[in-house]
């Protein structure tokens, strides 16, 4: 058989559903073999879109999303999405066609050393040099991508190797290492620290969701009566509606929930990753004992010196600690919770137009079911979404935060709809982020994945204006013009709506869900609220 056929058989052995990508001259052997494979190839309109789809697929499923390109510019177009997946701990296997090995020793058309290019943004990178190695390479790539902490494996596949013959080789058995169990000594040490705490607080990170430990986290918090804040990437690890939920941490500014960390004598970090929210922002004075509960050891940081580390299956560790630790008499941060609830509903009926961010998010939450999925693109809207969108389930609010890459919204929503076709998938995106991968609405229509694209329209880079005004008091080079988004949607065969008053958003969203196709909603936003929030948090006085 051809090496390309063996490669595809190895992919089938990994039980993958989709490959997102674009065909090219150097991957023609693979493309031909895929015609007879149960794997569905999703032809995208840009390789960055393909990588983002694989990224979000990996985050939602815990299985490796797969993206593919040809060599040279096709491969370089994967880079941003691959880097995003790697930093956000999404399991992805990226594959690129490559020039023949017979021309790698000299200047050659579209040839780049792709292994060196992808090495800094991947967990594992390799080039297939001999067809006999394909089963080992593919198995290792998937094993590395999925292993905690997940990330990207990159495979370069030269065209002459793909077209060569290979005999006597079969896919390798898929095996996964069992997650280790924490030692009894560490469980007891953690329980003792928690039992002696006067003002403990829990910070849950994305590792809780990756490990499937959200239910155990909630039970842990309830048993010990300790309030929980989540990072941007762990929204929904505990329902926002839960009385022990303190919402989300992650803003650079000192927010209300920061008051809980200021007061805490023990901070229990569960599945927390530093890339989500750096310790110098929530532990600047190094005043508290830190308890690290995760499947991997803690990163070294002067603001993250541990009192104890419990390494093992997160859910099991939480359950075992809760069984022996002494509960608090009552939750200590109820006042913060009351403030959060008041703030979330403060603009529920705000008639201002263009709409304030708080009203947009309130209205969206009222329309969506708890299991529906919101994909936030990157921009000023991301900060508001992270802070105010009330996620009720794990993996129902996906935020790119480690790499924080604009353009993830539309392709991410497509991936979400493929994973969960029974749910509504909405991307909250800015006008700038939307236009970075807007071509993928054609992909969504072609493969029949109805998604809703809610554009916050302000005709500028609103997040950059926010930073410029905070630092310099004036804005610089952030303005641009937009197309008519309704006409733009209709030119693709999608539906388009323009919100023209605050009271129109809810019925427009309901109509978009009923339309059951790709829908673009142009919603003007008033980002003067950004600086109002900055001033408000700058004058914040903790209520305790």
Image: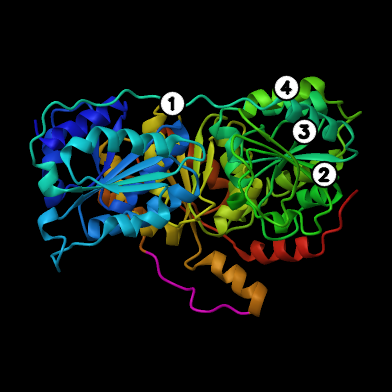
Horizontal placement of 503 versus 523: left or right?
right
Is residue 349 among what the camera can see? Answer: yes
The answer to whether the residues at label 4 and label 2 have Cβ atoms under 8 Å apart is no
Looking at the rendered image, the disc whose residue lies closer to the viewer, 4 or 3, is: 4
Of the numbered discs 4 and 2, the one sitting upstream in the chain is 4
What residue is at 23 percent from the left and 62 percent from the top? 112
Of the numbered discs 1 and 4, the one sitting upstream in the chain is 1
The answer to whether the residues at label 1 and label 4 have Cβ atoms under 8 Å apart is no
Residue assigned mark 3: 244
Q: CA distance from mark 3 to mark 2?
A: 10 Å
Give the structural element (helix, strand or loop) at label 2. Answer: helix
**Label 1 Cα neighbours within 10 Å, binned few <14 / some 14-19 / many ≥20:** few
Q: Is residue 106 above or below residue 406?
A: below
Residue assigned mark 2: 336
Q: Is residue 78 above or below residue 136?
A: below
Q: Is residue 283 above or below residue 174?
A: below
Of the numbered discs 3 and 1, the one sitting upstream in the chain is 1
Give the structural element (helix, strand or loop) at label 3. Answer: loop
Of the numbered discs 3 and 2, the one sitting upstream in the chain is 3
Query: Residue 189 location, x and y as percent?
Result: 80, 32
Q: CA distance from mark 1 to mark 4?
A: 24 Å
Residue assigned mark 1: 176
**Stretch of the chain drawn in magenta:** 474-482
Residue assigned mark 4: 320
Which one is nearer the viewer's eye here, 252 or 476? 252
Which one is nearer the viewer's eye here, 491 or 375? 375
């Amino acid at each position: 058989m051809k090496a390309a056929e063996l490669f595809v058989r190895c992919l089938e052995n990994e039980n993958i559903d989709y490959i997102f990508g674009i065909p090219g001259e150097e991957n023609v052997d693979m493309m031909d073999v895929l015609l007879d494979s149960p794997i569905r190839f999703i032809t995208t309109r840009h390789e960055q879109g393909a990588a983002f789809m694989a990224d979000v697929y990996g985050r939602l499923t815990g299985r490796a999303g797969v993206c593919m390109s040809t060599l040279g510019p096709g491969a370089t177009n994967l880079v941003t999405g691959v880097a995003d997946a790697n930093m956000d701990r999404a399991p992805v296997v990226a594959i690129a066609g490559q020039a023949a090995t017979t021309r790698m020793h000299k200047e050659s058309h579209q040839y780049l050393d792709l292994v060196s290019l992808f090495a800094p943004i991947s967990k594992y990178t390799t080039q297939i040099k001999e067809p006999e190695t394909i089963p080992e390479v593919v198995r290792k790539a998937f094993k590395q991508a999925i292993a905690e902490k997940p990330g990207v494996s990159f495979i370069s596949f030269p065209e002459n190797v793909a077209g060569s013959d290979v005999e006597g080789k079969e896919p390798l058995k898929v095996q996964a290492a069992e997650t280790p169990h924490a030692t009894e000594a560490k469980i007891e040490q953690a329980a003792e620290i928690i039992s002696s705490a006067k003002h403990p607080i829990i910070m849950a990170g994305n590792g809780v969701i990756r490990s499937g430990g959200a239910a155990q986290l909630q039970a842990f918090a309830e048993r010990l009566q300790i309030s929980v804040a989540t990072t941007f990437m762990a929204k929904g690890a505990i329902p926002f509606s839960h009385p022990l939920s303190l919402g989300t941490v992650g803003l650079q500014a000192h927010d209300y929930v920061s008051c809980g960390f200021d007061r805490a004598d023990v901070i229990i970090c569960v599945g927390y990753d530093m890339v989500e929210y750096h310790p110098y922002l929530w532990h600047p004075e190094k005043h508290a004992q830190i308890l690290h509960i995760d499947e991997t050891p803690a990163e070294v940081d002067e603001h993250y010196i541990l009192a104890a580390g419990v390494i093992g299956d997160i859910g099991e560790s939480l359950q075992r600690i809760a069984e022996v630790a002494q509960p608090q008499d009552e939750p200590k941060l109820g006042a913060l919770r009351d403030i959060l609830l008041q703030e979330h509903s403060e603009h529920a009926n705000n008639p201002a137009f263009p709409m304030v961010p708080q009203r947009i998010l309130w209205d969206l939450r009222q329309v969506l079911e708890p299991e529906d999925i919101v994909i936030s693109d990157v921009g000023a809207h991301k900060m508001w979404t992270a802070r105010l969108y009330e996620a009720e389930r794990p993996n129902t609010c996906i935020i790119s935060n480690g790499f924080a890459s604009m353009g993830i919204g539309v392709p991410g929503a497509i991936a979400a709809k493929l994973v969960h076709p029974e749910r509504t998938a909405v991307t909250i995106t800015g006008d700038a982020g939307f236009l970075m991968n807007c071509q993928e609405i054609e992909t969504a229509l072609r493969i029949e994945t109805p998604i809703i694209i809610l554009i916050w329209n302000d005709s500028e880079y609103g997040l950059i204006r926010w930073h410029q005004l905070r630092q310099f008091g004036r804005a610089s080079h952030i303005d641009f013009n937009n197309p008519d988004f309704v006409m733009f949607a209709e030119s693709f065969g999608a539906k388009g709506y323009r919100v023209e008053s605050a009271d129109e958003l809810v019925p427009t969203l309901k109509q978009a869900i009923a339309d059951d196709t790709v829908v673009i909603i142009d919603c003007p936003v008033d980002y003067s609220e950004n600086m109002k929030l900055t001033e408000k948090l700058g004058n914040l006085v903790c209520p305790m």
